[in-house]
Image: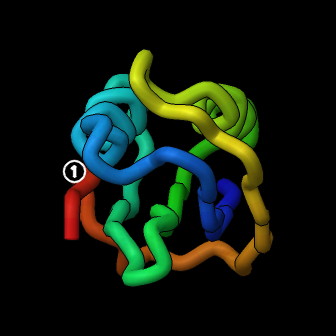
Amino acid sequence: MKRVHVIISGRVQGVWFRQSTMEAASGLGLSGWVRNLSDDSVEAVFEGSAGEIEKMLAWCKEGPPLAQVTEIREIENPETANLPSPFEIR
């Protein structure tokens, strides 16, 4: 199991990024959450198998069709069992 915390910057608010992230993460069987930040970026935490996490990170680099991702900052965190499952929007 792996846990990753990401901050996604660019045009990522007002383009269904959180909803699309929840759908993609749920489809991969990941636990965690996603939320908007006051600086117009999006923050998310994903937990699951390393392979599924890598697929999710690849998805985050593109996002939904209207998004324009300019940067993703990743912070790998120790595994934890207290993340929401199913994946949620905060």
- Residue 27 relative to residue 56: left or right: left
Residue 62 is situated, as x and y percent measured from the top left of the image, at 62, 26
- The quadrant in which residue 58 appears is top right
Q: Depth check: 42 or 84 in front?
A: 42
Residue 65 is situated, as x and y percent measured from the top left of the image, at 43, 16
- Residue 5 relative to residue 67: left or right: right
- Residue 4 relative to residue 68: left or right: right
The answer to whether 80 is drawn above or below residue 43 in the figure is below
Q: Regarding mark 1 in the picture, which secondary structure is present there? A: loop
Residue 42 is situated, as x and y percent measured from the top left of the image, at 46, 62
Residue 68 is situated, as x and y percent measured from the top left of the image, at 58, 34
Q: Residue at 35% of width from left, 24% of height from top?
A: 27
Dot 1: within a 10 Å radius of its alpha carbon, few (fewer than 14), some, or many (20 or more) residues?
A: few
- The quadrant in which residue 30 appears is top left
What is the quadrant of the N terminus in the image?
bottom right
Q: How many marks?
A: 1
- The quadrant in which residue 75 appears is bottom right
What is the quadrant of the C terminus in the image?
bottom left
- Residue 55 relative to residue 83: left or right: right
Q: Residue at 38% of width from left, 39% of height from top?
A: 21
Q: Depth check: 67 or 22 in front?
A: 67
**Amino acid type for the residue under numbered disc 1:** Pro
Q: Which residue is mark 1?
A: 86
The answer to whether 77 is drawn above or below residue 73 in the figure is below
How is the structure coloured here? rainbow
